[in-house]
Image (cartoon, rainbow, N blue to C red):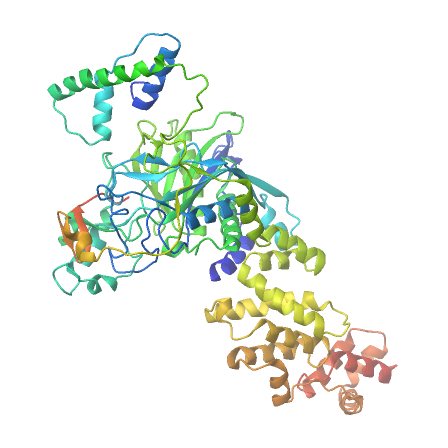
Amino acid sequence: MTAAINMTGETMNGGVGVAGGTAGRDGSTQYRADISLEVHVELKTRTKIFCDCPNSFGAPPNTNVCPVCLGLPGSLPVLNRAALEYAVRAALALNCTISPETVFARKNYFYPDLPKGYQISQSDKPVGTNGWVEIEGEGGANGSANGGAGAKKRIRIRRVHLEEDAGKSFHGAAAAAIGTATGAEDTSGDTASASGLPGSSGTSVPSPDAEADTGVAPAPEASPAGPGSDYSLLDFNRCGVPLIEIVSEIDLTSGEEARAYLQKLRTILSYTDVSDLKIEEGSLRCDANVSIRPVSSAELGVRSEVKNIGSFRGVKMALEYEIARQREVLESGKRPTLDTRRWDEKRARTTLLRSKEEANDYRYFPEPDLVPTYIDEAFVAEVRRGLPELPDAKLARLVAEDDLAPYNADVIASSPALAAFYEKGAAKVAQGATPAKVDAKRTFSNWVIGDFLSRLNAAGKSIEESPVTPEGLAGLVNLIGQGTISGKIAKDVFEEMFATGKAAEAIVKEKGLAQITDSGAIAAVVDQVIAANPGPVADFKAGKDRAIGFLVGQVMKLTKGQASPELVNKLLREKLV
Amino acid sequence: MVAGNPWLAARTWYNAIQKGGPFMPITRKDIDHVAKLALLDLSDAEKEKMVEQVGEIVGHFSRLSELDTKDVPPTSHTLPSVHNVLRPDIPGRTLPQDKALREAPDALKGYFKVPRVVEE
């Protein structure tokens, strides 16, 4: 949740792109970048994709395993119905065509995180093809802050396919840390000693594309001299967890666009509820392919593949780094090579993992242990019916029906939890408000994306953990709408609500914060202020209309902000004219 | 290109044979490549033997092209009537950790232990 909120902030500062179309250093050549992303998303089924081991994060190592996911001889995979359904749901949400027949294939490679020696994936018959999502076009980040006027850009999705995740490996220092951790020495039944390890620290990115036989530069920083430096440790709990891989077309042209695309995927998928989408736990992972070419060239340049991207900001930074690096290579007169590179977020640079002499040779062939799956139209229709309103549609509806500013609607629609909060509260706020000058839902939306979100972020809480309920916030907004409290007092009341969980009405009553709407009481203060400020009074009478602001301020001060500003203004004018 | 990729090679042979073209034998280069992918450490003599034997196998399968498959749709499987074998998403039994690790050549603190692999 917090990530979605933070990223909205990012959107607003975004658009610094080193991007395509920038001039060479001497101004002679303009280059453009061509980018595609491969995004892996772990599905939150209860069990793994091809066996009934639990799919859960953080269990002691090698306890959620069975002969199938350990690749023991004679074991046979059987497809999890829920994994197929989730994949279809995600593919539909991404506007894909669902294949009437989908087939699994073996992707052959050797790496110890996959004990079978191949990954069961999909090749020529993926679950979904030809989808798309829309993002703000270049420069649209600012457009959205100004009311979402930015042009939309459609990013095509080539395919969405199902596959199994690999195990988790620990190398170098991380392996050494496990090896030297105090605890029982022998492994049998000793699940507790390893379970206290932070699941993510020092783990490698799963490596479905890894090749063991290529000359790879080892990462020196991960290998201090120590007992761990000569072995790697493997936990197969994640092996066989269902993944969907979402492959975009080469439609992205800058790091910022790639970031926006990834964020949009995450938003859409969060509505489909097929994954936890936690980048930090590895349930959403991203590889990027990028090449650059002179804008005058119709032919794509030589690409590099960037792995290990671990955050939304990282996608943008890694791609901008790669684009600049490739430009330097080109400008120095060399030819870029077909590289696989690793993003090092700490050092903000990519390092060479391997140079590909030839295309990967995974020798895909149809998985003989699994039969084809026919996906009939009735099933697709049923899954489609189960989809909730998706973010683009929600945004449009909030603008059209609730009359929200497009920026507000965009922020609210970017998270299902926030949208649910807004919609629950908006239903109440519409009922309670008097026909006020300001539209109640608009005011409510300002509170939701303003004070409410920033307070939550400051407290490090998710929307689900908020001490203020949608109905509670609606109650506060209704008090403003009814003129019981001013917007300024409302901010103090909100703080109190957040701290105590009490209702706005109760706090206002308890603390006597209701606006003074008794004109007699205010008139006395008004007289007092007029008497004490002959200068501004004279100014106002001389036609300086702005002088009344000062006088209103004085009355508000004396009434501790509880006078109705409209009433004060009205009384002052009556008395001074 | 063809020499570097046995599957593409097989398809190319198949296509060539379909057209009544010449049968392309397996070369030493194909064997080198497949051995590398399969992490097989073969001696020169073994490789020469493989050139011959794999060549014979592929040659044998080329006889399949004598069949008229004009009206047979391509299939990924040999059991045309079996499809949609799915299981419900209900957790079952797992192996206890000690059993899971029992056949491992080496283990440590509940993990499989393998020679150091380079960081990916």
Residue A515 percent location from the top left of the image: 71, 84
Residue A272 percent location from the top left of the image: 51, 53
Choose top left, top right, bottom left or bottom right for residue B96: bottom left
Residue A226 seen in render: no
Q: Is residue A540 left or right of residue A345?
A: right
Choose top left, top right, bottom left or bottom right for residue B77: top left
Work out which quarter of the rendered image holds the C terminus of chain A and state it: bottom right
Judge whether A265 appears above or below A303 on screen: below
> Which residue: 64% across, 47% down?
A150
Judge whether A434 appears above or below A204 on screen: below
Residue A432 percent location from the top left of the image: 71, 75
Judge whether A550 appears above or below A145 on screen: below
Residue B37 seen in render: yes
Judge whether A425 appears above or below A242 on screen: below
Using the image as rendered, state which of residue A7 and residue A61 is in the foreground: A61
Choose top left, top right, bottom left or bottom right for residue A323: top left
Q: How many marks?
A: 0
Using the image as rendered, state which of residue A473 and residue A565 is in the foreground: A473
> Which residue: 58% across, 50% down?
A385
Q: Is residue A303 left or right of residue B4?
A: right
